[in-house]
Image (cartoon, helix red, strand yellow):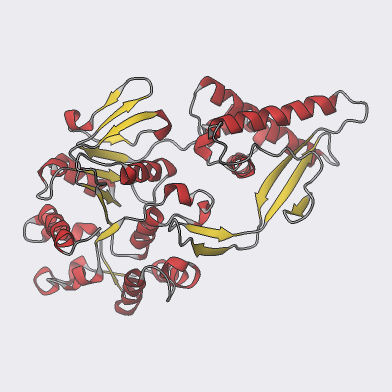
Amino acid sequence: MEVSDREKLPSGFSMPPPPGSLEQTPKERVLEYIETVFSNITEEIVLPDGKPTITLKRRAKKPAHLFIDPVNGALESNEAVTYMTYSWPGKSVHEAWKFTVMAKVLSIISEALRDGLAISKRDIYYSDPACFGSQRVVDVAVDDIANTIGVDRLALNVEAAAKGLTAGCYRIRTKFNREINPWLSMEDTLVPRMDDIDEVDITDIKWVLILEKEAVFRRLASSGYQITATMGKGILVTAKGYPDLLTRTFVRRLSETKSFTQSVPKIYTLVDCDPDGIAIMATYKYGSAAHTRENSRLNVPSLQWLGLRTSDLVEGADERGDEALLRLTSRDRRKALAMLKNNPVWAADGPEPEWRTELQQMLMLNLKAEIEILYGRDGGLEEWIDLQMRNDTLKGGS
């Protein structure tokens, strides 16, 4: 059963605690909601005519209107919300199965929160694949539960396996009194869970550089660029492509943490000169269309584009030759056109006219290139990055 959020709430719908409560953490809100749901189920199931139900909030299937919030700079949406009620034993076998799925997922989340364990959607699925049937069933259930309570997936202790990497001159102290110090090990470290962090010490940090590619990250980290950069010590981060929620949360935390100078570090990004590179950069700065409800907690408004631009491709092309330049694929062109048409970030009156121009130039020139094109420049990649950061400082970039 689906109804609009403008109509009366379905019978049996358990409202979560009000958002923004000063007395409750997001995880406490989740536990209270789950306890309320199971309490209602227990009360109903013992009645002769009882009908246990679970009602969840779902995003409408029709496309949402996307916009940039002028206050927080995040990509958000005005999407209608519907409610779906699952009952037991239900009007059909399918409805009874859906009720069982939701109850099982809620139970697993509750157990994980109480035990302090982080789990993934795949962990949930493989706990009973015969019941769930497919991974997508679990994915939808988890998203609907988070949407209903008004929290992100991290508050459910459900998260993807960490894929982001970081290296740099900082220290982290966890709530378990453990210290993470990439500076001492000189090795890359998996991006930590922010829920486990008590303190982030970036005393010596002047900049954070987000890199699209793992290969580029490893090249810079292995050379110690995070220590030897001419603009001072910094932190390297990569999510190996499009960022996961953990990496976005980590970068957001860094962007809000002050150094010894009582100023936050500069946040830069270096991505391929192609539609995907620009889309990845936009995900960090504004958020993604898939997570509009969470973007305001994850976006980094201060992020600055270091490169790669089409002007970087044209510069020195005669000496380098054309072999380093690539032609846009049909997928590249479709993606660029969709970005220009559907996302307010690249709208004609949007917040990023330079990004819009870059996409248009790519389409016009039918050219793209990868970060690795900078390896062959005089001084290599490291000197090129030094120069871009220095120019930003001279321009008074913020």
Quarter-wise, where is residue 18 in the image? top right
Residue 154 screen position, x and y as percent: 49, 37
Residue located at (59% from left, 23% from top): 111
Work out whether residue 81 can be spotted: yes
Q: Of residues 257 and 235, which is closer to you in this image?
A: 257
Q: Residue furthest left?
A: 378
Quarter holding the C terminus is bottom left
Viewer-nearest residue: 101 or 147: 147
Residue drawn at the location 19% of the way across and 68% of the way down: 312
Q: Position of residue 242 (x, y in %)?
A: 39, 51
Q: Can you say whether 17 is above or below 244 in the image? A: above
Depicted 269 relative to depicted 354: above or below? above
Q: From where the camera sits, is residue 130 visible?
A: no
- Answer with left or right where residue 176 lies relative to residue 289: left
Q: Residue 259: where, in percent of width, then height?
A: 23, 40
Residue 90 placement, left or right of 142: right
Q: Quadrant of residue 181?
A: top left
| Residue 304 picture location, percent across and down | 28, 58
Is 208 situated above or below 199? below
Left/right placement of residue 297 relative to residue 225 reads: right
Question: Viewed as shown, does residue 259 lie left or right of 246?
Answer: left
Q: How many marks?
A: 0
